[in-house]
Image (cartoon, helix red, strand yellow):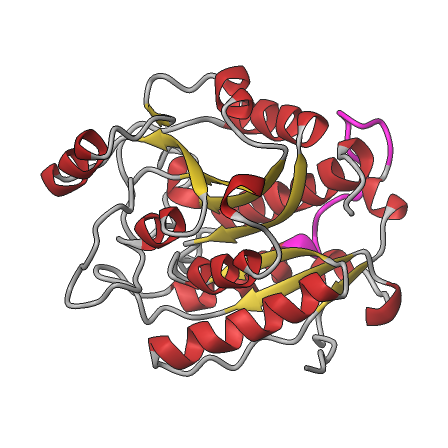
Amino acid sequence: MAFNKRDFSFLDLESEFEKAEAVVLPAPFEGGISYMAGTANGPEAIINASRELEYFDLEFGSEPCKKFSCFTAKDLELGNGTDSALKTIFQAFNNLLENKKFVLMLGGDHSVSIGAFEALSKKFARNELTVLQLDAHADLRDNYLDSKFNHADVMRRAREKFDCVQAGIRSISSEEIDFIQKNKIKNVFFLPDFDAKKIVSACKENVYLTLDLDALDPAIMPSTGTPVPSGINCKQLLELLCLLFKKKNVVSADVVELMPIKGLHAPDFLAATICYKILACKFLLGKKQD
């Protein structure tokens, strides 16, 4: 599968695909939504905002982007059909993993992560990897709106393939509570129990990070389809990211569910900053990927 370069790249970083250590993969799909539309515009908004960020990072005391090479792929052509979209995402993600790239996928709604889980399952056994979800919602329904492949059941699909750690959760259905209790599921950290050390310690050595931006407090991240009151703040998130990358081998990640609001640019910049921080942590703090 060939990857073409996007006209406007993340952070305006330029690298040839073959030499790139990281690949930003835009997946502008929102076929799995159930409420507000607009997450298909999320990847473009993040990339556009990233081009205005300063490279210098006060925490690192340097310009992290100078320490790694990054290729921004052209937006995946995903159409409106969930099955075909997830197949395309799987193929792209699988190819990138085979090429030993650190993938940062930009959604789109949270259903895009299912394609990544399928690709990861070809490389890692259940006992070899943890899916770490940061999210306001548990996403553990088995079937929602006559579909097993949308944002509300993405972590049910993840748990079919891997052990999972879920954090930031503050919105959950009775069905999902019953599922957790019946299966004696551990490592679901409901707010206000958001402790970076506990969360990271619960993960296996290899981790896939899936970050739904509604995990953040809507006071700082209102641009999501289903915002939930309260939520984690920037300091908590950055503390977790730094500890996670120091202690574990984060093999790839996704950032999903940005629903840009016209005229409100701060959430786009926050999402872009988080993406930059993920890459910085991977290549300046992270363990070497096999």
Q: Position of residue 81 (x, y in %)?
A: 34, 81
Predominant SS along the magenta part: loop
Can the viewer see residue 16 in this picture?
A: no
User: Which residue occupies the foreground of this view, 246 or 109?
Assistant: 246
How many callouts does the rendering have? 0
Say which quadrant the N terminus sits in. Answer: bottom right
Q: Position of residue 240 (x, y in %)?
A: 57, 26
Left or right of 96, for residue 172 = left
Q: Position of residue 38 (x, y in %)?
A: 36, 65
* Above-or-below relation of 168 to 83: above
Which residue is painted at 72% across and 36% down in the image?
281
Which residue is painted at 54% across and 46% down in the image?
271
User: Which residue occupies the foreground of this view, 40 or 261?
Assistant: 40
* Above-or-below relation of 142 to 203: below
Part of the protein shown in magenta: 50-62
Which residue is painted at 55% across and 63% down in the image?
119
Q: Position of residue 62 (x, y in %)?
A: 87, 33
Left or right of 46, for residue 176 = left
Which residue is painted at 39% across and 60% down in the image?
109
Q: Within the image, what quadrant is residue 279 found in?
A: top right
Tell whether position 250 is magenta. no
User: Which residue occupies the foreground of this view, 81 or 59?
Assistant: 81
Tell whether position 58 is magenta. yes
Can the viewer see residue 217 in this picture?
A: yes
Q: Within the image, what quadrant is residue 136 found in?
A: top left
Q: Within the image, what quadrant is residue 262 found in?
A: bottom left
* Above-or-below relation of 19 to 275: below
